[in-house]
Structure formats: C-alpha cells, structure tokens
Amino acid sequence: MKNTNKANLLHRMKIAKGHLEKVISMVEKDEYCLNVIQQTQAVESSLEKVAELILENHLKTCVRESMESGKNIDEKVKEVIEVFKRK
Amino acid sequence: MKNTNKANLLHRMKIAKGHLEKVISMVEKDEYCLNVIQQTQAVESSLEKVAELILENHLKTCVRESMESGKNIDEKVKEVIEVFKRK
Amino acid sequence: MKNTNKANLLHRMKIAKGHLEKVISMVEKDEYCLNVIQQTQAVESSLEKVAELILENHLKTCVRESMESGKNIDEKVKEVIEVFKRK
Amino acid sequence: MKNTNKANLLHRMKIAKGHLEKVISMVEKDEYCLNVIQQTQAVESSLEKVAELILENHLKTCVRESMESGKNIDEKVKEVIEVFKRK
C-alpha cells in the first residue's frame, strides 16, 4: 500500500478506536440506550469506510497484478466476493 | 455473460419475482406482519445473491479485460466500490 | 393494518415487482452488468423500505398490545430483534 | 440497564476495542489486505451484536414503559425505525 494511503487508513482507524472508547464510557455512564446504539453504528460506518478503502487499494494492486499475469484470477475474484458477502 | 450463467441468473430472478408475488398476496390476505417482513427479507436475500453472481461475472470479464489492457482501471474499480457501498 | 397503510404498502410492492420485471428484461437483453446490479440493488432498497414500514406498523400495533397487556413481551421483542439481525 | 447486561455489553465492547487495536497493528505491519478487511468486518460484526443487545434491552425497558403509559409511543417507534434504517 502506498504510504499516503496507509497513513490515511491508520488515521481513520485510530479515530474509530477513539470513538469506540467514548461509546464504552457512554455505557459506563448509563447514557440513553438509543444514543449509545447510534454512536455504535457510527463507529461501524467508519470501519465500513476503512474496509472500502482497503478493498479499493486491493483491487488496484493485488487483483490487478493477478489479472495482468493471468495467475490466480479465480481465487482473487472469490476473495473479493467473500468481502462483498460478509458486508 | 456465458449462456449457462445467464440462464442461472434468469432462473433465480424469476423465482424471486414469484416469491415477491406471494408476499404481495400475503399482505392482501392480512397475514401476520412479521411473517410478511421475513418473506420480504428472503426476497431481498435472493436478489442479493443475484447481485453477487453478476458482480462475480463482471470481475471475471469486464474488470479483467480492463486490467489486462490497462484501460479504464480507475473507472472500473470505482464502479465496483460503488456496488460495495450501496450494499 | 389500517387500510391506508395497506394500500400504500401494496402500491410500493407492486412497483418493486414491476421494477424487478424490468431488471429481468435487462439481463435478457445483455445490458451492462453494473447497470443490472445497480437496478437489482434499487429493488432491494424498495423492499427494505417495505419491511421498514411493516415493522413500524407492527411496533405500533402488535408489539404495543403485547406491552400494554404484559403478555408475550419477550417473544415479541425476540421477533423484532430477529428482523434486525436478518437485515 | 440491568447490571449483568451492562457488564456483558462492556465486556463485548472492550473485546471489540482490543480486536480493533490488533487490526491497526496489522495495517502497520503491511499484512495482506484481504486479511485486514476480514478482521475489520469481524469487528463490525461484534459492534453489530452490541447494537442488537442494546436494542433488545431498550425494547424491554424504555419502549415498554412508553407503551404501558401510552406516552411518546410514536417517538419511541420512530427511534427504533431509525436504528433499523441505519443498519
């Protein structure tokens, strides 16, 4: 992964982690359930964006190399489909 | 798309359509709400599988050709990411 | 379900069915894969909205009655959670 | 929230946080993209389960009280539907 992409990803993931820590403290302080759910879902969305950025990078590098060389194409496609299914 | 894949897809889509028609008649007959939701979600799952099969085919054909030729790679990757985001 | 809600639901479901029929004809005509996926996902979104409207009605009627009477509350809550999980 | 439920939730959330920290270190070590995506999606699933448990508790307490007292029912139902939509 390019260094700029990697730095961007790590930045996003650390923000998501900080956000999750705040949600944990919301539960400790007995805040209103629905606010906790909403913030939990916001952390999930941040992680979803992270997964999306990694997938984009993966398609432009590993999958591309596989397709250019004609090697392991079925395996690479299967892996991408698995990511899609788990979403 | 290969003819076998296309026939398989059309078969699945027509089954989903028949299923949806049954769900419509469940609503007309005032069946229990949660059964209707469950069957609606089952139709959605069938369509999700259809989208997944088309995506698999797309990766193995259009995306592969783009990557082999080095043409429109960013555009093709962007399109795949859009499919992932909308899921 | 109130008649207005039921009519609204049936209207939405029939539009979704018509939309699905168009997507089937897109596959028959070999239209561009990604357009087919996009339209398939649009049908799924319409069905998702249908599920959401039925759930809303269900909470305001069946779940409410259960909670007012104190009967079957655990079962009703479990059913709603199942809908949430399958989403 | 009952103390046992709260302790269970906090336990799950702290495990999810530890998991996320491991995923961050996977990115720092340049591990295979798809493994990182898979683990990111696993953290999301854990958070999804957390949201589901809070929603279950919310239905059995706040929503139930609202429905028993006949107060703010529309508002409570709307909030639950919002959770469902954001999923």
Image (cartoon, coloured by chain):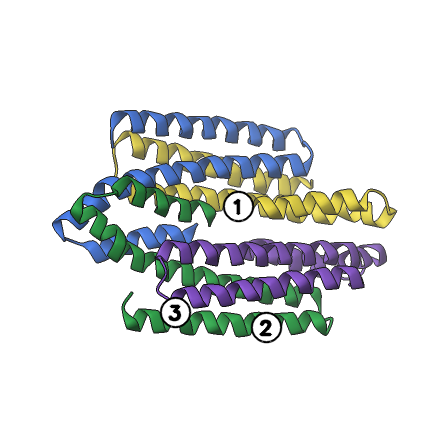
Chain colours: A blue, B green, C purple, D yellow
Q: Is residue C81 visible?
A: no
The quadrant of the image that shows the N terminus of chain B is: bottom left
Q: Residue at x 46, y 29 (%)?
A: A17
Question: Pointer 2: what residue?
Answer: B21
**Camera-side residue of B71 and A73:** B71
Check whether the beta carbons of the residues at disc 2 and disc 1 lie within 8 A of each other. Answer: no
Which labelled disc corresponds to residue D48?
A: 1
Check whether the beta carbons of the residues at disc 3 and disc 2 lie within 8 A of each other. Answer: no
Classify D33 as above or below C87. above
- Residue B86 horizontal side relative to residue A52, left or right: right
Classify D65 as above or below C34. above
Expressed as whole percent of the image width and height from the top left, the position of residue B52 reads 38, 58
Mark 3 closeness class: few <14, some 14–19, many ≥20 residues within 10 Å: few
Q: In the image, are marks 3 and 2 on the same chain? A: no
Q: Is residue C84 visible?
A: yes
Expressed as whole percent of the image width and height from the top left, the position of residue A6 reads 30, 28
Q: CA distance from mark 2 to mark 1?
A: 32 Å
What is the secondary structure assignment of the residue under circle 2? helix
Q: CA distance from mark 3 to mark 1?
A: 38 Å
- Residue A53 horizontal side relative to residue D44, left or right: left
- Badge 2: chain ID: B
Q: Residue at x 30, y 45 (%)?
A: B76
Q: Amino acid at mark 3?
A: Glu
What is the secondary structure assignment of the residue under circle 1? helix
Q: In the image, are marks 2 and 1 on the same chain? A: no
Question: Pointer 3: what residue?
Answer: C28
The residue furthest left is A69
What is the secondary structure assignment of the residue under circle 3? helix
**Camera-side residue of B18 and D75:** B18
